[in-house]
Amino acid sequence: MVSKRNQHKKIADYLDRHPEGITPFEAFVCLHITKLSTRIGEMVRDGYPIRKIMEYKMTDDGTLVHYMRYWRGEDA
């Protein structure tokens, strides 16, 4: 079992390498983390500066989907 702290480190390292941020899908595919919002909340409580924004995208079949994107931010 992967510890929460290990997942926090994976997310922090990813955000350091990807200034455009991370989405739940990217966290699952790239980091094998399924509860990104939970881990982000824990990191914020620990003082890690994270910003977030809701993004919207139209799929090929015309369905509107929304998801959160998180990135490093000094004013989180």
Image (spheres, rainbow, N blue to C red):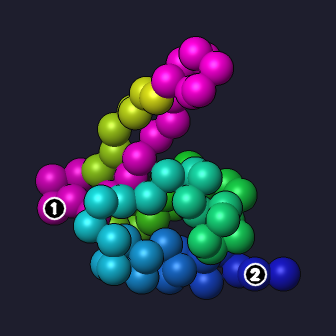
Q: Amino acid at mark 1?
A: Glu
Describe residue 10's horizontal placement relative to residue 49 as left or right: right
Describe residue 24's horizontal placement relative to residue 17 as left or right: right
Above/below status of 66 relative to 63: below
Residue in front for this viewpoint, 34 or 75: 34
Describe residue 35's horizontal placement relative to residue 5 as left or right: right
SS label for mark 2: loop
Which residue is denoted by mark 2 in the rendering?
Answer: 2
Residue bounds of the magenta highlight: 58-76
Q: Residue at x 60, y 71 (%)?
A: 30
SS label for mark 1: loop
| Residue 68 included in the magenta stretch of the image | yes
Residue 46: percent from left, percent from top:
41, 67
Q: Residue at x 50, y 52 (%)?
A: 23
Above/below status of 43 relative to 25: below
Which label number is shown at residue 74? 1
Q: Outermost residue toward the front?
A: 60
Residue 75: percent from left, percent from top:
15, 53
Residue 31: percent from left, percent from top:
62, 73
Residue in front for this viewpoint, 31 or 5: 31
